[in-house]
Image (spheres, rainbow, N blue to C red):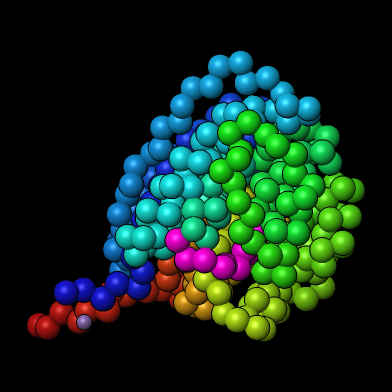
């Protein structure tokens, strides 16, 4: 048999209705064709590709209050939740390739259905914690965390195709890294709930290694829980990853971005990963799309044992003359 660092289950979620810009649904296949699975296997992972989910067409998905495309988003995430739960039940670390960040609703919900309580590390320029009533855009990719937190449950109105969503994360088990574009309503929520936040100011002040040290100390202060890493490619500076829907200057360097995944990998607690918001149509050139996709691949390889010092297969032996 072979030594396997990790057993990885890949789910493609080609979904874009959490936001208005076409192209983000191309993320899963672009990340695959950039060689993700082959590279994971080369570094000693066992990889199972569960393929791309298909989502039901929803007609007449009229706004509910300000919330846009609720029926499509609710339906897609219910399907994703089932799929992630099954991947976890098969014993893999789940990797959900987006698609927009509204997919974190299903991914985290399904992960928690399989493993129970978990910690969430949310790496993003944005907090994505608007409630349906604080959101000014109505785009659900800016709201996913609000549906998942126990502490916000009373602030969530009834939405069509959302009745299946049960809050499953406690505010004390959530850590943000990379924030630099947070709405007033979101900032109020983060302060009210005392959510742990390492904004880009803290990244500058502490450096990424201290941020990761403090993140892991904070999350394991009481009970070590499986970690769900929800990585929005727009956490990285747009000079590196411009092909995304809501780019914000002053982001993480490539090196900081990879350090985050390398560090979480070595905790041995990484249990589910999202990689979202890669949108090739938002790049001005093919090269910009390629840089964005290849960075996404490298971030994922860091989650599963790749080290910049180099790697070699466990069974490696020098060739004899
Ligand atoms: N805060 C804004 C922008 S949220 C950006 C969503 S994402 N998933 O981080 O790209 C909103 O609520 O629409
Ligand atoms: Mn062995
Ligand atoms: Mn974002
Ligand atoms: Mn996001």
Where residue 114 appears, as percent x and y from the top left, is: 45, 61
Single out the residue that lies furthest toward the top. 60
Drawn side of residue 193 relative to residue 257, left or right? right
Where residue 190 appears, as percent x and y from the top left, is: 82, 59
Above or below, 131 relative to 41:
above
Front residue of 288/272: it is 272
Q: Which residues are magenta?
A: 114-126
Asked whether 219 falls inside the magenta stretch, the response is no
Above or below, 63 relative to 106:
above
Q: Quadrant of residue 18?
A: top right
The answer to whether one can see residue 294 in this image is no
Above or below, 210 relative to 280:
below
Where residue 199 appears, as percent x and y from the top left, is: 79, 62
Above or below, 218 relative to 7:
below
Query: Dividing the image into 4 quarters, which one contains the N terminus?
Result: bottom left
Drawn side of residue 272 relative to residue 230, left or right? left
> What residue appears at the point 26 percent right and 76 percent down from the top-left corner?
3
Where residue 71 appears, as percent x and y from the top left, is: 60, 29
Single out the residue that lies furthest toward the left. 321
The answer to whether one can see residue 22 in this image is yes
> What residue appears at the point 51 percent right and 41 percent down from the top-left corner?
78
């Amino acid at each position: 048999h072979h030594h396997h660092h990790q057993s990885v289950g890949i789910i493609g979620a080609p979904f874009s209705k959490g936001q208005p810009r076409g192209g983000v649904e191309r993320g899963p296949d672009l990340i695959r064709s950039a060689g993700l699975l082959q590279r994971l296997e080369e570094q000693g992972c066992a990889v199972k590709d569960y393929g791309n989910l298909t989502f039901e067409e929803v007609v007449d998905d009229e706004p509910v209050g300000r919330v846009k495309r609720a029926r499509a988003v609710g339906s897609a995430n219910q399907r994703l939740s089932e799929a992630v739960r099954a991947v976890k039940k098969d014993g893999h670390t789940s990797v959900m390739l987006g698609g927009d960040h509204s997919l974190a609703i299903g991914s985290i919900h399904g992960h928690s259905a399989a493993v129970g309580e978990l910690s969430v590390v949310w790496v993003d320029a944005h907090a994505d914690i608007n409630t349906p009533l604080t959101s000014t855009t109505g785009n659900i990719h800016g709201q996913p965390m609000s549906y998942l937190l126990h502490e916000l449950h009373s602030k969530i109105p009834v939405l069509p195709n959302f009745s299946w969503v049960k809050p499953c994360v406690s505010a004390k088990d959530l850590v943000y890294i990379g924030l630099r574009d947070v709405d007033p309503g979101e900032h109020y929520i983060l302060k009210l709930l005392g959510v742990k936040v390492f904004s880009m100011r803290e990244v500058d002040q502490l450096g990424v290694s201290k941020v990761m040290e403090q993140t892991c100390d904070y999350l394991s202060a009481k009970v070590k829980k499986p970690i769900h890493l929800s990585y929005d490619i727009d956490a990285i500076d747009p000079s590196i990853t411009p092909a995304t829907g809501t780019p914000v200057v002053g982001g993480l360097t490539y090196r900081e971005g990879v350090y985050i995944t390398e560090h979480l990998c070595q905790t041995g607690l990484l249990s589910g990963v999202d990689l979202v918001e890669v949108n090739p149509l938002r790049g001005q050139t093919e090269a910009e799309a390629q840089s964005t996709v290849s960075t996404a691949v490298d971030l994922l390889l860091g989650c599963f044992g790749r080290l910049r010092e180099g790697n070699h297969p466990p069974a490696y032996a020098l060739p004899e003359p």
